[in-house]
Image (cartoon, helix red, strand yellow):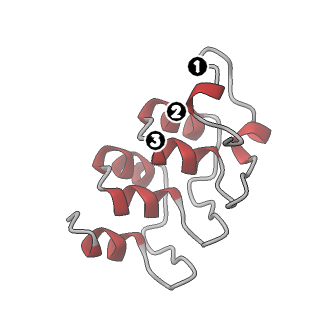
Amino acid sequence: REAFGRNSINPTRPLSLSTIHRRNAYGENLLHRAVTHQDINLVRRIIKAGGNVNAQDYAGLTALHIASMEGFYGIANLLLKAGADVNATQKEQITPLQDAVKEGHY
């Protein structure tokens, strides 16, 4: 079972930084999971609560890498406005922009 998922976060309670920064077995935090599930409202809440938009999982992926690979334009735009690093590289030295082009999302 996932350490945290869409249904485990109460939408009416404020998010604590410990909840936001908690990692699963892959090093993903709540922002990574919110992007994966296309939960733009949770992404907004995490940003508003002070979540790190440039946090990397164990493979070096940021939330922007995920949004770029999957073509989640609205979420990618939100992350960029919040200061996500478009030049962040994952372990294979690939940036979110390169991921987007590779997957045909440009």
- Alpha carbons under labels 1 and 3: distance apart: 15 Å
Q: Which mark is residue 37?
A: 3
Pointer 2 and pointer 3: residues touching (CB < 8 Å)?
A: yes
Q: Which residue is mark 2?
A: 42
Q: Position of residue 44 (x, y in %)?
A: 49, 35
Furthest residue in direction front, as rendered:
1
Q: Which residue is mark 1?
A: 11
N-terminal-most mark, 2 or 3: 3
Pointer 2 and pointer 1: residues touching (CB < 8 Å)?
A: yes
Quarter where residue 91 is shown:
bottom right
Label 1 packing within 10 angstroms: few (<14), some (14-19), many (20+): few
Q: In the image, which is nearer the foreground, mark 2 or mark 3?
A: 3
Residue at left offset 73%, top offset 57%: 25
Secondary structure at badge 1 equals: loop
Q: Which mark is residue 95?
A: none
Give the amino acid at mark 3: His
Horizontal side, residue 79 vs residue 56: left or right: left
Q: Position of residue 10 (x, y in %)?
A: 64, 20
Give the amino acid at mark 1: Pro
Label 3 packing within 10 angstroms: few (<14), some (14-19), many (20+): few
Could you tell me which quadrant the C terminus lies in? bottom left
N-terminal-most mark, 2 or 1: 1
Could you tell me which quadrant the N terminus lies in? top right
Furthest residue in direction right, as rendered:
18
Q: Position of residue 34 (x, y in %)?
A: 52, 41
